[in-house]
Image: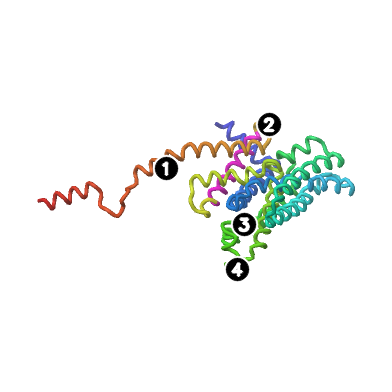
Amino acid sequence: MNNVASEIIAMLTDPLMQRSLMAALVVGLTAPVIGTYLVQRRLSLLGDGIGHVALTGVALGWLAGSAMGLVENDALAVPGAIIAATIGAVTIEIVREKGRTSGDVALALLFYGGIAGGVLLIGLAGGTNANLMGYLFGSISTVTRSDLVLTVALGVVILVVGVGLRAALFAVSHDEEFARASGLPVRVLNIAIAVVAALTVTVSMRVVGLLLVSALMIVPVAIAQLVTTSFRRTMAVAVATGVSVCLVGLSITYWLPQSPGATIVILSLACYLVVAAVRPLVVRRREDSRDPHPDMLDDVALSEGATQCSE
């Protein structure tokens, strides 16, 4: 018992784990918030597409850092990812808004071009396969102090927009035509969702990786939808689930040499399977205990009443 406590204390006092846990907390808070809107809009794979494009931004940041002779070649990787992901998200939103038949083809070209360009450019900038894997699947060793400051700042922006504009963003996500008829600036709000989704991808990049960030945006929401019925409760449960799996999954990688992104995503999927398996049993028990006619006296009372009348 004392060994377990000393191991936990050692983990919490490790500066690298402190930065990583703080980043994981921000990711767990922000990713499900934006994921709730994406699921509502049936754009669950938008985060995946933005992640592909962001990899090109990471590579461009590497090239810029190398050209400027910076000590750390990847010092501009996150800013590059932010710029590329934002441009990619706005482009995807414009293509979606046009609604043309060739929209899916344009999106596919953007996705595949993004990841292929990123792999090639990182190689040209002097990056290694280890660097590439760190960005694709997450690596706690890449979370620097400056990255943490930027992650926290972006996380605050995401939460202010995602939670502060919840009513307007929900209206647009639920029914664009109704929102437009109500006088809401639909195009501006759609672009706001796309930009915030791009920021969420870049915030999550260090912890879960660009290829797995979409899972953290969607799976907690899918878990919440199994146990809730309202949009607000779905967002709250999804955030609680996201924070839990991020912190627990990252803590597991402190003792086991596994990818943090893969561990967090597998943990999320395991939670989904458990909740999906338990939910039918709970719902059946509630239905069995529910009075089908709550406005009428139950059978016992009716029998007693009938007895009294007869008497």
| Disc number placed over residue 183 in the picture, else none | 4
Q: Earlier in the sequence, mark 1 or mark 4?
A: 4
Q: Find residue 257 and name its label.
A: 2
Left or right, 196 with reference to 57:
left
The residue at which mark 1 appears reads as 283
Q: Earlier in the sequence, mark 3 or mark 4?
A: 3
Q: Is residue 271 magenta?
A: no
Span highlighted in magenta in the image: 235-254
Q: Which of the pair 289/245 is nearer the observer?
A: 289
Expressed as whole percent of the image width and height from the top left, the position of residue 66 reads 88, 45
Residue 73 visible in this rendered orientation of the protein: yes
**Mark in the foreground, 1 or 2:** 1
- Pick the residue in front: 242 or 296: 296
CA gap between label 2 and label 3 equals 34 Å
Please name whichever residue, 19 or 86, is drawn nearer the observer in this view of the structure.
86
The disc, 4 or 2, on the residue closer to the chain's N-terminal end is 4
Mark 2 element type:
loop
Q: Quadrant of the N terminus?
A: top right
Quadrant of the rendered image containing residue 100: bottom right
Q: Is residue 239 magenta?
A: yes
Which residue has dot 3 on it? 162
Dot 1 amino acid type: Val
Q: Which of pointers 4 and 2 indicates the residue nearer the eye?
A: 4
Residue appearing at x 84%, y 39% in the figure:
123
Q: Earlier in the sequence, mark 2 or mark 3?
A: 3
